[in-house]
Amino acid sequence: AMTYKKPLKCIRFDGGSYFDCPPVYAVMTKYNIAREQSAPYMHHQLKMERWWATMQHDAAAMCGTLSLSKGHFIHACLHAIHVRTVTARRRGDKMTAWELVTGSKFNIERFRIFGSPAYGFLPKEQRRQLQHDKSDPTAIHGRYVGNTGESWMILTPTKIHHVGAGIIDEKQS
């Protein structure tokens, strides 16, 4: 509830039944978040429809360019949203959405080409969680699918790993 250094006080729902369930209420109670009911969803009321279409087109282009499988599409969508959030401004705006919410600029030097082959170093704690011993490799091989804070996300067939150190081979993409 404090990801963006602002406390989340209330969530507004439009009556979708998938939010009307005990697990959602449990999390809201745990973080002391109130619930409000909004008017039923009408697509013409929201400008988000344009953002969703743009995100899907960006993701399709990323996956199509690299001939990636459908399994990469959701990660490409999330990456496209992240890139647009930290770089896009509307005409007349002095700050991006990221800067408005966090109060700081995002270091775009951390972005790499989506889907590039990547090798991430796993510290001892992460190797222990994966039940690796001393003879197992200290790195994982996968594909770059985005960033979180100061770490890269590397997708392997079984999991997304968050690594702070690694090599992303953008020349092979």
Image (spheres, rainbow, N blue to C red):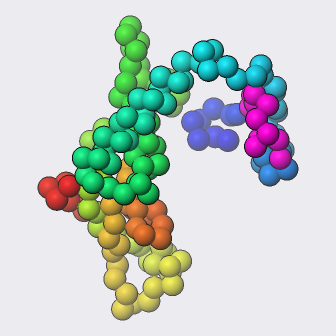
In this picture, residue 152 sits left or right of residue 173: right
Q: Is residue 40 above or below residue 64?
A: above
> Depth check: 4 or 41 in front?
41
Q: Quadrant of the C terminus?
A: bottom left
Q: What residue is rendered at 25% in x and 52% in y?
A: 66
Residue 42 shown in magenta: no
Q: What residue is rendered at 37% in x and 34% in y?
A: 57
Q: What residue is rendered at 83% in x and 47% in y?
A: 21
Q: Which span is picked out in magenta?
A: 9-21
> Depth check: 84 or 86 in front?
84
Question: Please, which residue is most extreme toward the left here?
Answer: 171
Q: Position of residue 51 (x, y in %)?
A: 47, 26
Q: Position of residue 71 (x, y in %)?
A: 44, 57
Residue 7 visible at all: yes
Q: Position of residue 27 (x, y in %)?
A: 78, 48
Q: Is residue 124 above or below residue 23?
A: below
> Depth check: 99 or 62 in front?
62
Q: What residue is rendered at 79% in x and 31% in y?
A: 15
